[in-house]
Amino acid sequence: MVLAGGFLVSIPVFFQAPLVRMLPWVSLSLTCFWGIVSFRWRKSYPLWGDLLWGFSLTWFCGSIYWGWFRHNPAIHLPLEAIAFPIAIWGICRRWSLMGNYFYLGSLLGTAVTDLYFYITGLIPYWRLVMMTDSNLTGPILHDCLARLQTPWGISWAIVLANFLLAVSLWGVARRENHYLVFSGATIGTIITDVLFLLSVYVNFT
């Protein structure tokens, strides 16, 4: 379940991101597909049907923000949290626990990543990257890397990564499927961020 949670967190970054920029309505409409598959799988594949429900929530929120509002980082977290009341409602009723905990783990990882952007002063670069043609973002991303490689950037990366790791280990220690998925989602955030930084470093240094 930890691996499944981590895997599903990485899909929106490496698959949904390019899709939603080119075809936002297609990405958004896929939410219905994921939701339908989730409910159909509940009898035959209950664990995967449950987990896919949480994935559909993250996909829906991501489609809205990255499809139409990606130029405004200030509303990134609020839009990613649109499904938060649904997840809490489901948890209180003990319905689709794995799916709802997956969404919460993904949302926590998003919040920590956004916090890092604010602390290290990367928000202006976020806006520039979103407003610049993808073929011309090299100098901007190069400046981002320079800021990340400062003692301040490295120190906060270590602090926040350790926080997410601690939360993940707490979930693993609970040994219940929904907590394991939650842990996988938070660990997946760390892995995804590292892979993204490595790709930027390789391409722009």
Image: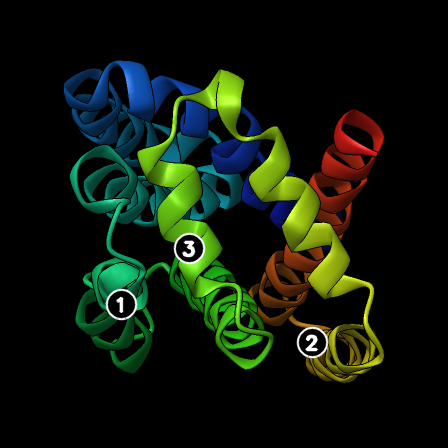
User: Do the residues under discs 2 and 1 have CB atoms within 8 angstroms?
Assistant: no
Q: Relative to residue 135, is residue 93 drawn left or right?
A: left
**Vertical position of residue 77 compared to residue 140: above or below:** below
Quarter of the image where one finds residue 59: top left
Q: Relative to residue 20, is residue 47 drawn left or right?
A: right
**Vertical position of residue 149 compared to residue 168: above or below:** above
Query: What number is the disc on residue 164?
Result: 2
Give me the C-alpha separation between circle 1 and circle 3: 27 Å
User: Do the residues under discs 1 and 3 have CB atoms within 8 angstroms?
Assistant: no
**Vertical position of residue 94 compared to residue 11: above or below:** below
Residue type highlighted by circle 1: Ala
Residue type highlighted by circle 2: Leu
What residue sits right under mark 1 in the picture? 74
Looking at marks 1 and 3 on the same chain, the residue that comes earlier in the sequence is marked by 1
Looking at marks 2 and 3 on the same chain, the residue that comes earlier in the sequence is marked by 3
What residue sits right under mark 3 in the picture? 99
